[in-house]
């Protein structure tokens, strides 16, 4: 197991990258890129990592993009910023590591899915995103979505690498 695959390191790395994305946005994209490149260069099996990350990242990017297009999120001068794509390349990496406990019991990702949208409120407080519909309406939209999405993402994170010969 490499350093980036250790639970404690993954948690610290994720939070550092989250802050780089949300606080720094485009200005700190260089730091975000370095942090992401470090992780993917250091994992023991890049194919296995991508097999687990890409489905969740694709789902998250698609949902958040749809929410931006429909006016739930407003990112200012850009419809969907690169730093949000980066967040979605980072978040799935915590599911089999720092948040591995979610996969042990079926209801845990549903419960955390009800809480996870508060990260969007934090992002709004930091000025990274505007919530034109207001906090309450946005949460009414996001909570059910996340209560469905997070269990799916946990399932994706538990996938085994299948190599066809």
Image (cartoon, grey):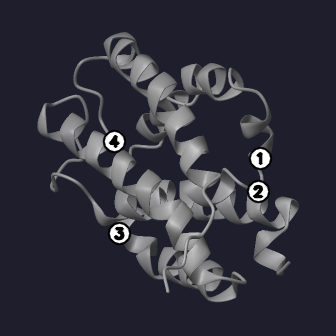
Helix, strand or loop for disc 1: helix
| Callout in the foreground (3, 1) | 1
As displayed, is residue 70 above or below residue 126?
above
Helix, strand or loop for disc 2: loop
Q: Which residue is mark 4?
A: 129
Return the mark for residue 100.
1
Mark 3 or mark 1: name the one nearer the start of the chain.
3
Label 3 and label 1: CA atoms lie apart by 30 Å
Label 3 and label 2: CA atoms lie apart by 28 Å
**Image coordinates for residue 7, horizontal then vertical, percent:** 84, 59
Label 4 and label 3: CA atoms lie apart by 13 Å
**Image coordinates for residue 14, horizontal then vertical, percent:** 66, 60
Return the mark for residue 97.
2
| Callout in the foreground (3, 2) | 2
As displayed, is residue 148 above or below residue 34?
above
**Image coordinates for residue 57, horizontal then vertical, percent:** 42, 56
**157 relative to 121 in the view: left or right:** right
**6 relative to 14 in the view: left or right:** right
Q: Which residue is mark 3?
A: 26
Mark 1 or mark 4: name the one nearer the start of the chain.
1
Instruction: Verify CB contact (< 8 Å) between mark 1 and mark 2.
Output: yes
Q: Quadrant of the N terminus?
A: bottom right
Mark 3 or mark 2: name the one nearer the start of the chain.
3
Residue 18 visible in the shown view: no
């Amino acid at each position: 197991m490499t350093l980036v695959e250790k639970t404690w390191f993954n948690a610290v790395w994720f939070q550092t990258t989250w802050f780089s994305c949300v606080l720094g946005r485009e200005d700190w994209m260089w730091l975000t890129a370095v942090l992401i490149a470090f992780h993917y260069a250091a994992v023991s099996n890049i194919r296995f990592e991508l097999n687990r990350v890409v489905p969740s990242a694709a789902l998250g990017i698609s949902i958040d993009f749809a929410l931006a297009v429909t006016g739930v999120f407003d990112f200012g001068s850009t419809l969907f910023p690169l730093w949000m794509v980066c967040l979605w390349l980072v978040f799935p990496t915590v599911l089999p590591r720092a948040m591995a406990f979610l996969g042990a019991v079926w209801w845990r990702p549903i419960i955390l899915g009800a809480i996870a949208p508060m990260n969007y409120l934090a992002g709004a407080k930091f000025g990274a995103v505007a919530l034109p519909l207001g906090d309450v309406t946005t949460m009414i939209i996001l909570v059910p979505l996340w209560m469905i999405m997070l269990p799916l993402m946990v399932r994706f994170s538990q996938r085994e690498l299948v190599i066809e010969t």
